[in-house]
Amino acid sequence: MQEIYCPLHLTGVAAAVAGALGVEPPKESAPALEPIAALCKGGVDRVLMYNPDAVALWLFEKYTDLFLPVMRRTQLTLPLQTVMPSVTPVCFGTMYTGAEPAVHGIQSYTKPVIRTDTVFDALLRAGKKPCIISTGNDSMSRIFLERDMDYCIVDTPDEANAKALELIERDRHDLIAVYNGNYDGTMHKFGPESPEALAALRHNVNAFSTLADAVQAHWTAHRTLAAFAPDHGCHEIDGDCGSHGLYMPEDMNIIHFYGIV
């Protein structure tokens, strides 16, 4: 069977998000993804980036009904190809710099602070206020540190989502990025299609839905781009466990959703 890889690339997300907010893209970023730019025509003044870990395109294709709450709150369903190696710090490094791993510097499962220009740096130069909400010692809580911005580092995904709800209600940030690693951690242990992993994925779907509804309730004075934006996919390995990191469609093809709220 022929292996098929999505023609649109994760490298175009950073410039699209920056452009939607009316700021210059990160200095090393690829051009903006046109479907996101078209959705955001006229601009937005708030962005919610919900970043679940390891949500593959094949999961959406096989369990489409599970994603219906996300689709009801967005207008763009966008299959993308991620970067190699398809592991968390490499892929999120690319998502928020718009650069290939060889440029932003993370080319393995390591978590150094990225020095390459990011969406967060672009927003700060424009006088805007970004915030990252993540669980301790995970990639999103480490690779974008040492910037003059807000970080909320908590113990669990539920705490991260609760903090996001709090910050949405306060309405003080132009971009909020929320990381949830519960599906990734569960699928590694039990397998991508195990009852435990699918429950975690459903939890991610419900978390995004709750956050998007909060944006609609509290950011009424703003035009907001809300994104469900994972980093890489996953596949099953021997022992009924899950893994990722290979150049194969299961790991490389991911599914993003974008909506104007």
Image: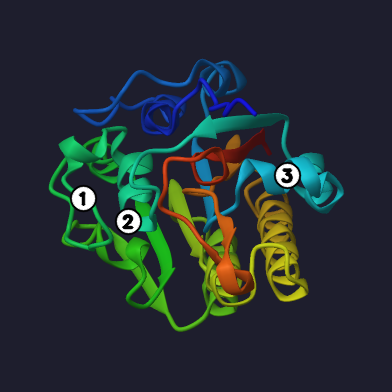
Q: Residues within 10 Å of mark 2 (few under 14, many from 20)?
A: many
Under tag 1, what secondary structure? loop
In the rendered structure, are the residues bearing label 1 and label 2 in contact, judged by CB atoms less than 8 Å apart? yes
Identify the residue at horizontal 50%, vertical 22% (top origin).
8
Name the residue type under label 1.
Ile
x then y, percent, for residue 132: 39, 60
Q: Which residue is mark 2?
A: 89
Quarter of the image where one finds residue 235: bottom right
Instruction: Check disc 1 and report the residue beneath it.
Output: 106
Q: Amino acid at mark 2?
A: Pro
Q: Quadrant of the N terminus?
A: top right
Q: What quarter of the picture does the C terminus occupy?
A: top right
Q: Mark 3 to mark 2: distance in Å?
A: 23 Å
Q: Position of residue 203 (x, y in %)?
A: 71, 68
- Is residue 117 visible from the viewing direction of this image? no
- Which of marks 2 and 3 precedes in the sequence? 3
Question: For the residue marked with disc 3, what is the amino acid?
Answer: Phe
Q: Dot 2: what SS?
A: helix
Q: Earlier in the sequence, mark 1 or mark 2?
A: 2
Look at 22% across and 48% down and name the residue there. Answer: 107
Q: Residue at x 72, y 61 (%)?
A: 210
Q: Quick check: 84 above or below 137?
A: above
**Which residue is label 3 attached to?**
60
In the rendered structure, which disc, 3 or 1, sits on the residue that comes first in sequence? Answer: 3
